[in-house]
Amino acid sequence: MKTLNVFFLFNLLCLSVQGATLEFAFQLGEKQEPRLDRLLPDVARQMAFNKDDTKLIVKQMDGTVVIWDVQTRQNRIVYTVPEKRWFAYAVDTDRLLVKAADESVAIVHLASNAEVTLAKGVYESGSLSSDGTLTVLSEGDERIEVWGIKPSDTREAPDGEQVLPQKLKTLETTMPIRNGLTLSGDGRFIAAAGGSYREGEGHRTAIEIWSTVGDHPMRIFDTGEILGVWNVLFSPDAKLLAVDTQKNAQSGIRVWEIKTGRKLLAKSGFEAYWTRALAFSPSGEYLAAGDEAANLRVWDISEGESIIWETYPTGIQSLAFSPKGNYLAVALWDATIQILRWGDKQ
């Protein structure tokens, strides 16, 4: 009862600390009773807002991709992908990078529903630049494929011709890419979370940072943790990189500065086994984290402190800030998405 009271209080009040504010706006989806054996099909596995903050693109646990209209609070199904993975959304061009039913990787233009096959293979991870012109893919081995995509690739071309995507290069990593692969929004940098296993030590993860125009990693971040990574993400300005960590059944987070390699935020020992969701604020000053123990925390990166901490009735699966900074979406295990109004000193 105490947890529920806190939740309803949060819905009524605005949290404001050191210039950052969160206030409940509305809810998307109908509340369901969370399952203990596996997440409900309608739980949002991944989310992204469109460029003008009017739509929320959601990949559900059952593989259904839906678009929520923020104003009408209605949704429509736009695609269905294999249950376990949806790769990326290009916010500037409204495109999806998806793994199709035949195991191929495709680019889907949401406005026209046009679809183009990018590559065929057993790809385990991938990412897409904000303008939709650059893609990185990995089969979970020690290679990263970098692909270029022309703007006409996802539209009908004149005379029935179609420009094919082009593989630009293949990069060789030092460890298999088992824990995540992401491309900065501007397409300048690649982050590859490679995993290793040693007897007596368990699993370890190091993140290699590559320039998309280079042939060698420009930096390697050793997490110093035995972990599996749920999240590897760049800040909107591509200056920072954030990951979650896991050790001794407790989760944590790390944030590094790309240019200098300096560790800006290092927190461990959270009560939750996994921190399942991370999201940078549009200004890049704050990092939101959501975990299995239902904690939503907003961290001031420069101060290294948690400035907002709220506990929900059930676990948090994914988070998304809107590009214009109006909202933070919080996807819960009860299949609802809580839309919070966001504001910071920027």
Image (cartoon, rainbow, N blue to C red):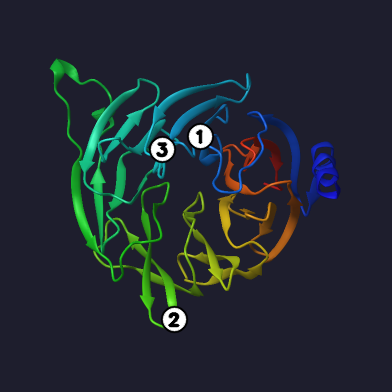
- Residue lying furthest top in this view? 159
Tell me which amino acid carries mark 2.
Glu
Q: Which mark is residue 155?
A: none
Residue 34 appears left or right of 19: left
Residue 325 in the image: state x and y as whole percent: 62, 39
Residue 191 appears left or right of 292: left
Tell me which amino acid carries mark 3.
Ala
Query: Depth check: 44 or 22 in front?
Result: 44
Above or below for 259 versus 64: below
Q: Can you identify the residue that label 1 sits on?
A: 58
Query: Depth check: 102 or 236 in front?
Result: 102
Q: What is the distance, in whole Å, between disc 2 and disc 1 at their CAs?
A: 37 Å
Residue 187 in the image: state x and y as whole percent: 36, 49
Classify residue 132 by image quadrant. top left
Mark 2 or mark 1: whose residue is earlier in sequence: 1
Estimate how packed mark 2 is, as few (under 14), some (14 to 19) or many (20 or more) residues with alpha carbons within 10 Å: few
Tell me which amino acid carries mark 1.
Val
Classify residue 69 by image quadrant. top right
Residue drawn 23% across and 20% down? Answer: 156
Residue 328 in the image: state x and y as whole percent: 64, 41
Q: Nearer the viewer, mark 2 or mark 3?
A: 2
Above or below for 336 versus 124: above
Q: What is the distance, in whole Å, between disc 2 and disc 3 at their CAs?
A: 38 Å
Residue drawn 42% across and 38% down? Answer: 89
Estimate how packed mark 1 is, as few (under 14), some (14 to 19) or many (20 or more) residues with alpha carbons within 10 Å: many
Q: Which mark is residue 90?
A: 3
Mark 1 or mark 3: whose residue is earlier in sequence: 1
Q: What is the distance, in whole Å, between disc 1 and disc 3 at their CAs?
A: 13 Å
Residue 59 appears left or right of 82: right
